[in-house]
Image (tube, rainbow, N blue to C red):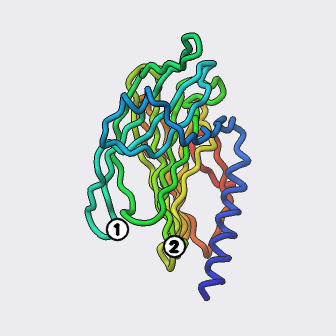
Amino acid sequence: MKAIIKVLLLFVVALVSSDAAKGEHASTKKHRVLYNPRVPLSIRQKTSTIAITRFYGETIIKGQKVALHFYDSQPMKKINKYTAQQSSRLDLFIESRHREQRLFKRINTIPITYHHWPGGKLIVQMEVLWLAPASQTKPIIKVRVETRLSSGEMSGDDLLFIFPNGLRKSAATQSFDFNYLSGSSGALSNEFGKADKKGFITILQKYVGGNGIEYTAWKWNGSRFAVVQELHISHEYPRRYKWNGEQLVEE
């Protein structure tokens, strides 16, 4: 019975996802930041001694080489068996050279607090997105923090550091959780592959459970991403939807 339900869930997810992907508006452009286990000494010296590095990488943003250092700024606070609170920071550095020496100037540091499972294997990835993907302006640094358990379950957060006025200016931060849990708890995922009619990236959050699929659409309101649509699709009566640049609409 569980196997049949799982197949049905996968079918409905594929049905809606494939049709949503047919939206006529531009998809987002992004690139992965490669992990580098060697944090330069000059960057480590600018970080607190209690900090724990979770990700370090270097990439090109608007023609300039940028170093990105994401780390735990405070020890984890365990709230209960399933939840822990983590305070972290993202530091941004501009690289230059003086003769043979690499120099790093910190241009911004942004704090963020989020929640995650206190146990399991921690996996951190980083991508550069754009709030306005067509023009590749207003960068977004997305840090994906994922905890995997030996049971195969996983839970995590997509942490967004949004720079509407450039990397040197103040940033907005938001967290979107995701998970894959056993039993009837279902799965929650985030999609960052669509843009609205104004050219700004949108976020589609999808929950697949025993009662159907729940979609939540988020759009940029000038200062943060806000909910603009909540949609329920029953497993018994699956329907086709597509993204029209403003919301999911039935075909």
Looking at the image, which is closer to me, 15 or 239?
Answer: 15
From the image, which quarter does the N terminus lie in? bottom right
Upstream in sequence: badge 2 or badge 1: 1
Residue 242 screen position, x and y as percent: 67, 50
Query: What residue is drawn where x is 45% and y is 30%?
Result: 41
Tell me, for residue 150, which label it has, or none. 2
Q: How crowded is mark 1: few (under 14 residues within 10 Å), some or many (20 or more)?
A: few
In the rendered image, the residue lying farthest to the bottom is 1
Q: Name the residue under label 1.
A: 82
Q: In which quarter of the image is residue 128?
A: top right
**Residue 49 at x, y percent in the picture:** 31, 39
Name the mark on residue 216. none
Q: Which residue is nearer to you in this view: 199 or 83?
A: 83
What amino acid does circle 1 point to?
A: Tyr
- Select label 2 or label 1 by which is in front: 2
86 on left or right of 98: left
Q: Position of residue 6 (x, y in %)?
A: 63, 77
Q: What element carries label 1?
A: loop
Horizontal side, residue 24 vs residue 40: left or right? right
Q: Which residue is drawn at 66% across and 67% down?
A: 12
Disc 2 residue type?
Ser
